Amino acid sequence: MDRLVIRGGRRIEGSVQVRGAKNAALPQIAAALLSFERLELGNVPEVTDVDTMLALMGEFGMVATRGSGRALALDAREARNAVAPYDMVRRMRASILVLAPLLTRFGSARVSMPGGCAIGARPIDLHLKALDALGAEIDIEAGYIQARTKNGGLRGGRVVLTTPSVGATETALMAATLARGETEILNAARDPEVCDLALCLTAMGAHIQGAGTHRMLVQGVDALHNARHDLLTDRIEAGTYAVAAAITGGNLEILGAHLEHLGSVGAVLESTGTQIWPTDRGLMVVRSGPLQAIDVVTEPYPGFPTDLQAQFMALMTIASGASVIRETVYESRFMHVPELGRLGANISLQGSTALVRGVERLHGAEVMATDLRASVSLVLAALVAEGETTINRVYHLDRGYESLDRKLVQCGADIRRVAE
Ligand code: EPU
């Protein structure tokens, strides 16, 4: 298990390239199972969650070939129905995204229930309700979801999501593409990654309207065909680098980033005293003045993303004043709080609300990464902590950030990766 040793106090400056979004790659790799023809994806990030998804696809006989420039060719011509085992689904919850494509293609699917997670209970009831609305028969047996279609396949229906779940919207969308007739998805998630899945499916021949709105309409087609699609860039990776520039009082151009994909994040950063503006190549982020504390509430897109909450909290630990951070998407995504405390942060937690009182300085310590975004918040805090910080269990980081330590080093950080 690698660890990172970070010596704080250097500004993050220069430019950094963001890659395709992990959370766009995962559903689109699963969607390749819907087709008897090839799907070529471009800009696929080299992160271990993508490797895990490809390993899962291997169980179903999908052939994945990586080409140059982060191209990925997916060939599911010889796909076979197989079980999505507990061991894989437990490791990566996004594995649940294979349920709809398997059910659509084979008329039945057996996928493990994911179980608990470090950031919240994360139930999958909305995925199952969406499939039920399209006529699937679903049973839970011994920790496995057993889904079947009746009367020759799924049929269009009305899917009403009680909360705009990203994954459940993606499940409904994938199932609806080949269902008979029209599907309406209400209270759909509007996230850029959902829109990107819709673009990919459309390139494959699906008929989808309303992506990016609360109401999506899908007209089922008989089959999908070969397609090529470049993934949109990772807004959470971009937001993380923006915080790296902001926390160190740096000056960074984030290549490939799009301000419009960041939702409310741009305005929030501006309120902290960080300037952020679009350039021809991406986004420029500069902080030269003092850092101000401001409050945030995480919300579904386009609200402030939960996937940037930990990074933003790291930023607030050294801001002037106090910041209230309320997490509304997950009930317990605060594993980074005690670890930030080890670096000298002053944070008190009450239920799903954190009160962060800015301190003059953080100091280096040994800390533990607990999940992807918690880990990166520790890296960000370590960039400004006095002395040396050691972050253990950084495999969490590698799940979703391509070469984070190398990229930060290129922008001036002092980081060593120590292999064990
Ligand atoms: N929810 C339910 N029932 C469901 C599905 C979701 O109650 O059937 C609840 C969840 O428990 C959660 C909320 O709805 O409280 C939102 O969950 P959502 O389904 O939107 O999340 P997801 O699809 O499981 C994706 C990202 C997450 C990101 C969330 C929210 C992928 C592969 N994962 O998860 O990314 O936090 O959307 O934006 O797209 C990450 O990258 O670090 C990460 C955790």
Image: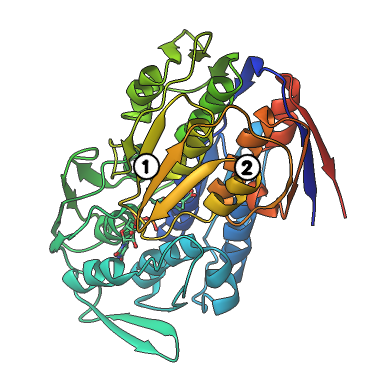
Ligand 1: does it lie within 8 Å of the C-beta at label 2?
A: no
Q: Residue furthest bottom?
A: 142
x then y, percent, for residue 80: 52, 73
Residue 203 versus residue 329: which sits nearer the camera? 329
Look at the picture and state if 414 lies above or below 30. above
How would you rate the neighbour count of disc 2 (Cα within 10 Å): few for under 14, some for 14-19, many for 20 or more? Answer: many
How would you rate the neighbour count of disc 1 (Cα within 10 Å): few for under 14, some for 14-19, many for 20 or more? Answer: many
Quick check: 76 left or right of 350?
right
From the image, which quarter does the C terminus lie in?
bottom right
Element marked by disc 1: strand
Q: Which residue is mark 2?
A: 378
From the image, which quarter does the N terminus lie in?
bottom right
Label 1, label 2: how many angstroms apart (C-alpha)? 17 Å
Q: Which residue is mark 1?
A: 325
x then y, percent, for residue 312: 47, 35
Look at the picture and state if 199 lies above or below 239. below
The amino acid type, in three-letter code, at marker 1 is: Ile
The amino acid type, in three-letter code, at marker 2 is: Leu
Element marked by disc 2: helix
User: What residue is rendered at 28% in x and 37% in y?
Assistant: 303
